[in-house]
Amino acid sequence: MNPYANDDSASAFHTTHWTQVLAARGESTEAKQALRDLCEAYYRPVEAFVRRYRFGHDNARDLTHEFFSKLLEGNSLTGVDRTRGRFRSYLLGAVKHFLSDQADRSLAEKRGSGQSPQSLQASPSHDRSGQEEHTPLDVADPHGFPPDAFFDRQWALAIVDTAMRILQTESQDRGETQRFEVLRRWLIPSEDGAIASEAARSLDMTDGAFKVAVHRLRKRFRQLVKDKIAASVDGPEALQEELDYLIEALTASESTSGSAL
Amino acid sequence: MTDPTFTTICPRCGAPATPASDLCPACLLKQVATGTGTDSLPNEPWTPPAIGDLAAAFPQLEIIELIGRGGMGAVYKARQKSLGRLVALKILAPQHAANSSFAERFSREAQALAELNHPNIVTVHDFGRAGEFYFLLMEYVDGVNLREATKGGRLTPEQALAIVPSICEALQFAHDHGIVHRDIKPENLLLDKAGRVKIADFGIARIMSAGRDPVSGPAMSTSAGLTQECALGTPAYMAPEQSAHPEQVDHRADIYSLGVVLYELLTGELPVGKFEPPSRKVHIDVRLDAIVLRALEHTPELRYQTIGEMRTQVMTVVNEPGTARAGSHADNVATRLSNVATCYLTTPEELATFDAQLFLYPYKAQMLLDNRQLSFARAGTTTVIPLAAIRDLSIGHYPRVMSPVVRLHFISVTYEEGGQTKRLFCEPVPGWFGRRSQFNRFVAEWFDAIRAAITAATGRSPGNTPANQLGTPSSSAALLLLLLLPLVVGLLLVSMVLWTPEQPSPAVADPPEVPEFKVPEFKVPEPRKRLDVPPPP
């Protein structure tokens, strides 16, 4: 299962930094833990990417698992290009590499295994499974990957989603679930005073108190998103750049990035 | 609702909308990027005009007091001097009246409201503009609204059930006249001293949304045709589509809002997030769970399609109390049964092609059935078919050429979407190897499961067309040709063999000659070798 779905650590925000991982070249225990946390946080974009790439393969999830366990156990950080600086770029590169490797291997197995050819008399199910096995041939094509924009969009969505979950969990802990459900709609600025005061009244709040509550929620949301992005980039100056980039990724035309979630 | 590609865009930033979220992720990130600059919250709330100012604008009225105020306006108690009757004067908040289309929209909508004459709807006596004020002059209801009535907590189920049928009747009446309330909430449901319920503020939300100025308001996309229809309502009571697609809202939004009100009346809480059925919270008839949960369906197609239908269900509970067993039914409602399988997905058009008949069509999908919908997930798209939208469910056979001996079956699903009838074929598969009978049995199991789910969800069973009338595509001519080709070639070869001058039949007829023929052949090579050796010496 997706560790993200029952992620108890959603409230414990990942403050470990990609820089820390890079500095230790993934060698130290802390760096390993940091990488583990990062991977867990970005499990979903990778899974979406693999799923789209090898759609229909029941093993998309297994592949994702395999990818992450290889990444975490292996010394795969040696090849990281420091200048690229972003965990997002690194992970995308790594997953592509992994998938090409997989494709090569299954291709080799297919050629060398010496299995007898399937009978033409086989049932349609045989035909289909035969067709299934052809897919790795397509995969060997380096251009067969979903566009990077798709991955970036998934990435941005994962960040927004995690921040939102944390906000929700925090509200739950304070016993303010209902309040949060109304307030969250105001995370996006709106200029309608009329609706705002309606909303305030539905929460039995004065307009002033409502305003303060919305302000606090937005502030917290900003903090959560920034923390999360900061943990995945190399240095604080890259934060704003990465944020702008992710906004661009979300705003870009769907035709280039495919479907989400 | 199918979601093949994301055709919807966020009206604020133009980014493709994400169905999983009601808040646009791009807008959220932009909020992070711009920081505190955007925190200037809503303008200061509008201050209702003083009684003195109104008196000047309404000389025919004696303004008594301010009795209520909301985001859309303020309500005053007044006496109509000529008739001596009490009236309620609603003054609309002026910030909504800023743009030019407002006046026209206002008079059109108000006229429709004035024609709504129902004992459970607050009557509109007059409307118009007096000085700077847009106003509605309405029947005065001496009593309290439902919010005030429930201030001390929740209503007893009996009390709640006593008023809901009247609300349903009034809403049905309005819906029949083409008017959707759009803002059903306890504040708009008034109880007079005789205990009668009256619905106030019909269609006001729609009038007010017309007044939102697309220029000064949030940047609305003019090209999307959404300019005039903004989400306006009370968030906690609004149907999901009301905030996502305000332009598509119909009467079923009211059904949702009434579901929220009913839930709140029964439990004292709002149904937000993952909420429990009412009977898990308070001791009530479990049949109410089904009613509330159906009204609160996310997809309009899955809700009651008319509010009258909802009323009938409520009346059943009222008239036949205590017949339902506690527990079991609630569990049934609360637990969403679900089935998942891998399947082949195709359409009648695709199935007629050469590729498809070689089983080369690429649409392998995951199919998922739960008690609300049947969905197919494949390469980046998900097709969601609400069970209520399925008109016909039948078993079909693949064309003979694809399964010559034992016919392979698939499930044909015919459904309505956006006013069109669509059909797709799916074949859930238990695995890649197996006997045909196994495949067909698996298809049959799924067929029964889907059928049962539709019947459970909608109370009716879908149509069932015999396989031979399904219009299954005939075998592809190209494929037939391909299959016939070896036969033709074979025949050709045979005829060529028959044409050779030697008679093959004697050879077959005289088997004894063969061994004799072989013997000399064996003997020939040996002498040759011996002959080859001598010359060198």
Image (cartoon, coloured by chain):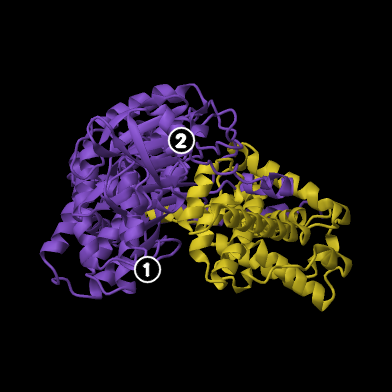
Which residue corresponds to mark 2? B52
Residue B437's image quarter? Answer: bottom left
* Residue beneath the point at 59% across and 39% down: A254
Relative height, residue B327 to residue B242 (above, below): below
How crowded pointer 1 is (Cα within 10 Å; few <14, some 14-19, many 20+) is rated as: few
How crowded pointer 2 is (Cα within 10 Å; few <14, some 14-19, many 20+) is rated as: few
| Residue B453 position within the rendered picture, expressed as x and y whole percent measured from the top left | 26, 58
Is A192 left, or right, of A243 in this rendering? left
Tell me if I can see residue B455 in this picture: no
Residue placed most toward the observer, B66 or B309: B66
For mark 1, give the secondary structure.
loop
- Mark drawn on residue B145: none
* Residue beneath the point at 40% across and 65% down: B275
Q: Which chain is disc 1 placed on?
A: B
| Residue B98 position within the rendered picture, expressed as x and y whole percent measured from the top left | 52, 27
Tell me if I can see residue B227 in this picture: yes
Is A72 left, or right, of B293 in this rendering? right
- Name the amino acid, label 2: Gly
**CA separation in Å, label 2 and label 1:** 50 Å
Residue placed most toward the observer, B531 or B100: B100
Is A229 left, or right, of B49 in this rendering? right
Which residue corresponds to mark 1? B276
Nearer the camera: disc 2 or disc 1: 2
> For chain A, what colour was chosen?
yellow
> For chain B, what colour was chosen?
purple
User: Is disc 1 on the same chain as disc 2?
Assistant: yes
